[in-house]
Amino acid sequence: MPDLDAFYSESQRKLQRRHQTEDLANTLFGAAVSGELSEQQSAFIESREFFFLSTVNGNGEPTVSYKGGAAGFVKVENANRLVFPSYDGNGMFLSLGNIAEAGKIGMLFIDFETPNRLRVQGTARIADREPDESEFPGAQLLIEVDVQSVFVNCARYIHKHSRAETSPYTPTESGDQPIPSWKRIDGFQSSLPENDRVRVATEGGTISAEDYGEKLRNGNS
């Protein structure tokens, strides 16, 4: 069980006292916050196709990323450990660089259809092990997360949406995925790694920035 005094910061406490919610915050902590994942929470995480990842760098500057994949791409190793893959991205490594530097993360899992949501806070690291292709097809790296706190939030402000389709860029069971349209933009070719330039040449060739903009507007990026 996380420590109540460590869970809330002094600034959060000041706002609670200002709005007379300190007792409520303490009650919610006792009722909704735990230091490990329950079976129900584990099943919820492994049913998700995406989550939002919050990280900070060594200066405390944050970034938030959307992470998507096939249902179950985030694995629950046990009640205190999560593992998720890092797929091919834009090469900036903002989230993973922050994890390597600071390690503190937040993960937000949402079901927009029910709706429902679950927050996980923990300490993350880039795993030393190579991804197992049978378990994490298409993964370049693995991120291990030691769970520090997990809690359910009220879903009243979640707008209800229906799922349309799986992203065509989700790696298949063999790890294959098409090259993203933005990597085909002609102005990026000299900056791409060699293997990406080869793929562009064999998977449709280059396009203009205007072509990409049209694809983006039409939802075909």
Image: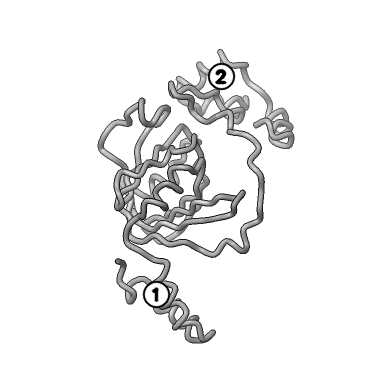
Mark 2 residue element? helix
Q: Quadrant of residue 120?
A: bottom left
Q: Of residues 65 and 26, which is closer to you in this image?
A: 26
* Viewer-proximal residue among 145 and 65: 145
Question: Seen in the image, is 121 located left or right of residue 220?
Answer: left
Q: For this rendering, which residue is in front, 118 or 39?
A: 39
- Which color scheme does this rendered protein use? one colour
- The total of numbered circles placed on residues is 2
Q: Is residue 202 above or below residue 129?
A: above
State left or right for residue 119 relative to residue 158. Answer: left
Q: Residue at x 43, y 21 (%)?
A: 174
Instruction: Quadrant for the C terminus, please.
Output: top right
Q: Amino acid at mark 1?
A: Ser
**Residue at image mark 1:** 9
**Secondary structure of residue under mark 1:** loop
- The residue carrying mark 2 is 200
* Rendered-image quadrant of the N terminus: bottom left
Q: Is residue 56 shown to the viewer in this render? A: no
Q: In the image, what residue occupies the spot 39% across and 55% down? A: 105
Give the percent coordinates (x, y) of residue 129. 26, 34
Q: Amino acid at mark 2?
A: Val
Measured in 3D between alpha carbons, the distance from the residue under mark 2 to the one under mark 1, in whole angstroms, is: 49 Å
Q: Position of residue 159 (x, y in %)?
A: 66, 56
| Residue 157, position as x, y percentages in the image | 62, 62
Is residue 35 placed above or below 181 in the rendered structure? below
Residue at point 60%, 24% (across, down): 184
